[in-house]
Image (cartoon, rainbow, N blue to C red):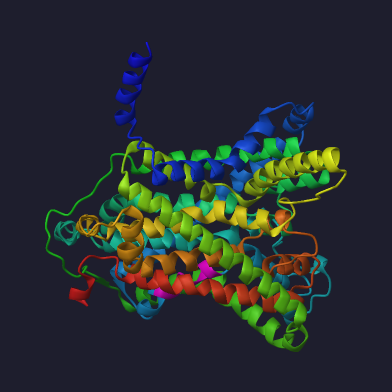
Amino acid sequence: MAVNADHRARAIIPRIGWRPDLWSVGGLSIALIVAVPVLAVAAIALGSSGDIWPHLSQTILPHLIRTTLLLMLGVGAGVLLLGVGTGWLVTMCRFPGRRIFEWALLAPLAMPAYITAYTYVDFLEFAGPVQTALRGLFGWRTPRDYWFPEIRSLGGAILVMASVLYPYVYLTARTAFLQQSVCVLEVSRTLGHGSWAVFLRVALPLARPAIVVGVILALMEAIGDFGTVDYFAVRTLTAGIYEVWLGMGSAAGAAQIALSLLGFVLLLIYVERLARRDRRFHDTTARVRALPQFTLSRPRAWLAFLACLLPLAVGFLIPGGILLKMALGRLAQSWDSAFLGYALNSLGLAMAAALISVGIGLFLAYGQRLHNTPLQRAVTRLASIGYAVPGAVLALGVLIPFGAFDNLIDGWMRAQFGLSTGLLLSGTVTALIFAYVVRFLALSFGSVESGLAQITPSMDMAARSLGNGPGAALFRVHVPLLRGPVLTAVLLVFVDCMKELPATLILRPFNFDTLATHVYTYASTGRLEDSALAALTIVLVALLPVILLSRAIASARPGHSAVH
C-alpha cells in the first residue's frame, strides 16, 4: 500500500510542476505570507460578529455601496473620455504643442488625489481666490447672492479623481495606438474614412483591451482612496471601514465592509480578464513605418490644443501652482526640524520597503524563470495580490494577525515570567513596512520579470555549463544585466510608498508622522498652507517615475528609432 501511495504521489508531482527546492518552496512561502492580510480580513468578516452585520446591511451599507458605484461610474466615464481622447490626439494628429503634451499629459500621475482635493477646496471655497474675485467683480456679498458649485461633494470627488487618474488610460491607450498596424489604418483611409471615422471604427476597437486595463487601474485607485472622500465627506466603502472600525469600535464590522470592497476589486479584475480573453491582434508584416498623422485645420488644431491643455491644467498645473505659491509663502516657517523629521521618516520607510520589495520580487521572478510551471505561475500571482487590495483593507488585515501575535506573546510572557512585552509588531514600523511590501510587491515583480524576459535563456545555459548553480548564475550573470529594471522597480515602489496614505494612517506608530500623514493632518483642519511644503515634496518625488514613463511610452512603437 505504501508503495502504491508513493507511486501515485510521484505521478501527481510532474503534472502540477512541483519541484521542491529553494526557489519553489521559498516562492510558495512568500505567497502565503503575502496572503495573510486578505485571509485575516476574510476570517474575521465571516466569523461570529454578533448582530453587527444585520445592522450594517440595513443602515449604512446600502448607502456606502450606492455612493461607491456612483463614484466608479463617474470616474470611469471621466478617465475614459480624457485618457482616450488625449491619447488619440497626441498620437495621430498634428497641432501646436503636441510634442510637449506627449509627456506632459502624464504629469497628473505625480499628484496624489488627496493633495489635489486639498488644493481645490482652498482654491474654490467661499474665502478662496475664485469666489473672492467673483464677489469683487459682481458686487456680491453673501452666498445667498449667487450660486457656486460645492467642491466638497460627490461631483467634486469625481472631478478631482478623474483629473489625476486619467493618465492610466492615456498611457495604455497611447501605447495601443502606437503599436497599431499602419496597413490597417491606411486601408481605412483609402476607403474614404476621415480621422473621426478611423478613430471610431478601426483604432478604438483595436485598442479596447488596453483601454479597459487603464480604466480598471484607475477605478481600483478610486475605490481605494481615503483622503479625498474623507475630506469631501463622501461616504464610500473605504470611508465606511474607518467609520465602523474607529467610530463604532467594531473590527468585525469593518472587516465585513472590507470584504464587500474586495468584492468590487475582484469584479474589476474579472472584467479586465474578460476584456483581454481571446483577443489578440498581430501585424501581418514586419515592416515598421511611421504612423500616418492627420493634419488638422487651424480651428481644429487649437481645439485639440485646448482639449489636451484642460486635463493637464486641472490635474497638475493648477494644484501644483497653488502648492508652489503656498510653499514659497511659508518656506521659512515650514522648513524646520519637524519637517525634516517627517521627510526622514518617509524616506526611511519608503527606501526600506523598496529594497525589500525588489529583493523579494527578484527572488520570485527568477524562481518563475527556473520553474515556469502552472503552479509556480499561480504562486507568483498570489504573491502579487496585494496591489489589488486597497490600503485600508490591507491595513486592517495586517493589524488583526499582528495584534493577535502580540497578545499571544504578551500573555505567555506574563504567565511565565510576569513580564509584559507590549507591542512587538502592531503599532511599529515593522507592520508599516510589511504592509508596504505586500501592497507594492507586484510593481517590483513586474519590473524585474520584464527585465528577465529580455535576457536570452542561452545566458543561463552558459552560466550552468561553467559550473555555476542557480544562485551563482543569478548574482553573477542576471543581476548585472538587470540594473535598469531593478532601479526602475526601486523607484516605482519608493514613490508609491511616499504617497500611500490609508495604510500609513492606520499602522503608523504613535507620534510618528510621514509627509503624507502630515499633509492629511493639517489639511483636514483647514491649514493646508502649513503643510504645502510637504505636499510639494511628495509631488516632486513622484515626478521621477513619470519621467521614466514618458520616455518608455515614446519608444513603445517597434522600430521607433528608425522612423524618427
User: Taken as a whole, is the magenta stretch helix, strand or loop?
Assistant: helix
Query: Percent x, y for residue 355?
Result: 52, 64
Front one among 413 and 93: 413
Res. 287 image quadrant: bottom left
Q: Is residue 525 left or right of residue 440?
A: right
Q: Residue drawn at (81%, 39%), measured in percent from left and top?
A: 411
Residue 243 among magenta residues: no
Res. 259 image quadrant: top right
Q: Is residue 382 left or right of residue 93?
A: right
Front one among 442 and 1: 1
For the image, the number of numbered tags is 0
**Residue 135 seen in render:** no
**Residue 255 seen in render:** yes
Residue 105 among magenta residues: yes
Q: Residue furthest top?
A: 1
Q: Residue drawn at (60%, 77%), measured in percent from left and top?
A: 320
Query: Percent x, y for residue 434?
Result: 61, 53
- Vertically, is 438 above or below 110? above
Q: Is residue 240 left or right of residue 193?
A: right
Residues drawn in magenta: 103-110
Query: Percent x, y for residue 119?
Result: 67, 71
- Vertically, is 93 above or below 372? below
- Vertically, is 76 above or below 92? above
Quadrant of the rendering where the N terminus is positioned: top left
Q: Residue drawn at (76%, 83%), measured in percent from left and top?
A: 336
Quadrant of the rendering where the C terminus is positioned: bottom left
Q: Residue drawn at (47%, 70%), measured in percent from left and top?
A: 545
- Vertically, is 140 above or below 490? below
Query: Percent x, y for residue 274?
Result: 38, 39
Q: Is residue 11 left or right of residue 503?
A: left
Front one among 377 and 197: 377
